[in-house]
Amino acid sequence: MSVHPRSLLPALFLLTYPSATLLIHGAGSALSIAAVVISLALLASPKAWAGLPPLQWDRTDFALCAAMVSPVLVVLLGGVWHGAIVPNEFDSPSRFFATVPLFLVLRRALPRTLAWADLSFALAGLASLGILLIAPRDWGLGRLSSKFLNPIHFGDIALVMGVLSVLSLNWWRKDRLVIRIIKVAGLFAGLSASLITGSRGGWVAIPVVAAMALYLRSRGKSRKWKVLLPLAIVAILAGVYVFSPTARDRVGDLSSDVVQYTHGNKDTSLGIRLQLYEAAVRIVASHPLLGLGGDGFRNSMQSFANSGLLTPAAAQLGRGEAHNQMLAYMTDYGIIGGLAGLAIYVVPGVLFWRRLAAPTEPARRAALMGLTFIVAFWIFGLTVETFDLKMTVSFYATIIAILAAASAYADRNGAVRSGGQADRAVVRAPRTPT
């Protein structure tokens, strides 16, 4: 399809970013940084050169930008409070901050540019499975992933890309059969990749996001649709458990961990997490306002091991991460850090929730996808630090910026509030970004 030269770079970025993040080491961070630099240049350029329309945003947009800035401010405040600023602690929070210019530019993009994100999630889902079939890395105990991303993060991203792939069906207009096949294949590829990695923590998100999406999409649907689709999802999940040895083994391991923990063996996957959670709660209770400061949780592991609260194995793994994103923020930066961590979920979540009632179907669908993405990542963060890697921070913040802009495009330039007129404008967008 033809695309205006000025829109070529953002169009290619929207189409390729998710899959490039999985395929190429460092691509996720590099592409997001490049997009931010270009966005800053566009925002600083004269209107005639940049070609951007006036920005019309509401309080929810402002709140989103403030939420993305808050982690950096908390890290800075914590460093000043404790008298020890740890430079590397700014690496991940700055990735949230950096996507603000990207959001401000995409917020003003035309629908025909934003529509290039249409196939991006399906391509990422397919890419995740392709990596595991063609060039996997065994990370130990039969856990497969890519060569540069551990099985937990890889499996979680593959899973959510598969879910967004199927939610993107008929996103911008009714998809042709081949596009529908690709998007459904993206769903099964993402689920399969997650299954192969054995990332149990991510699997908890499946019934939650499925129930949420079904509830939100069932409004106005027939009773037959409301009954058959949930049954189909349950049948698929049951089939995975029955026919997949990996799924059965991983679920069995969890049951075994519980039994061993009750009998005093705390050095299982579940047992170690429970030990670290207890240690984190103790830290928050004793340092509630601003925590222990940068690397505070990691540096406290030896003292907990010496006191007998942690086993040596748990203390060793705790030096790597707390295995819970909110507890990680709160141990290092207290309740204030916890509020900042909560903001990067809740504020964009509220934005997407409000835009579920947008005047056009593409905007409403983008809001549903964004809400699903956030809920999934929040669930991922219950058992692993999702933002301890710069790549995962960049990925989360960039996808939020893309979907937030897509969910709000109808508000730009005083766009009509009439669903019919707005939808006719979308029909002039490309059929599919191919």
Image: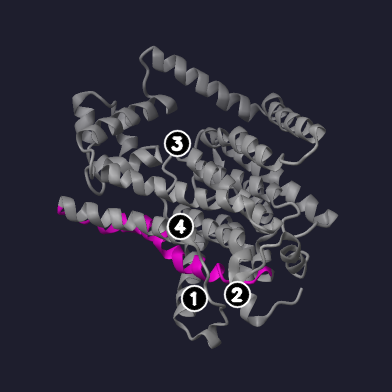
- Looking at the image, tell me whether mark 4 or mark 1 is earlier in sequence order: 1
Q: What residue is at 51 percent from the left and 48 percent from the top?
A: 349
Q: Distance between the residues labelled 4 and 1?
A: 20 Å
Question: Which residue is identified by label 4?
Answer: 64
Of all residues shown, which one is farthest toward the left?
A: 83
Q: Quadrant of the C terminus?
A: bottom right
* Secondary structure of residue under mark 1: helix
Q: Position of residue 56 (x, y in %)?
A: 53, 70
Q: Which amino acid does label 2 sit on?
A: Leu
Q: CB of mark 4 within 8 Å of CB of mark 1?
A: no
| 33 or 137: nearer the viewer | 33
Which label's residue is closer to the chain start, 3 or 1?
Answer: 1
- Marks 2 and 1: CB-CB under 8 Å? yes
Res 424 → quadrant: bottom right
Query: Mark 3 and mark 2: span between their CA atoms?
Result: 36 Å
What residue range appears in magenta?
83-111
Which of the two labelled residues, at mark 4 and mark 2, occupies the earlier sequence position?
Answer: 2
Residue 112, visible in the rendered structure? yes
Q: In which quarter of the image is residue 13?
A: bottom right
Asked if the stretch drawn in magenta spans residue 233, the answer is no
Please, what is the three-letter code of the amino acid marked with disc 4?
Answer: Leu
- The earlier-in-sequence mark between 2 and 1 is 2
Q: Mark 3 points at which residue?
A: 382
Task: Name the disc covering residue 38, or none.
Answer: 1
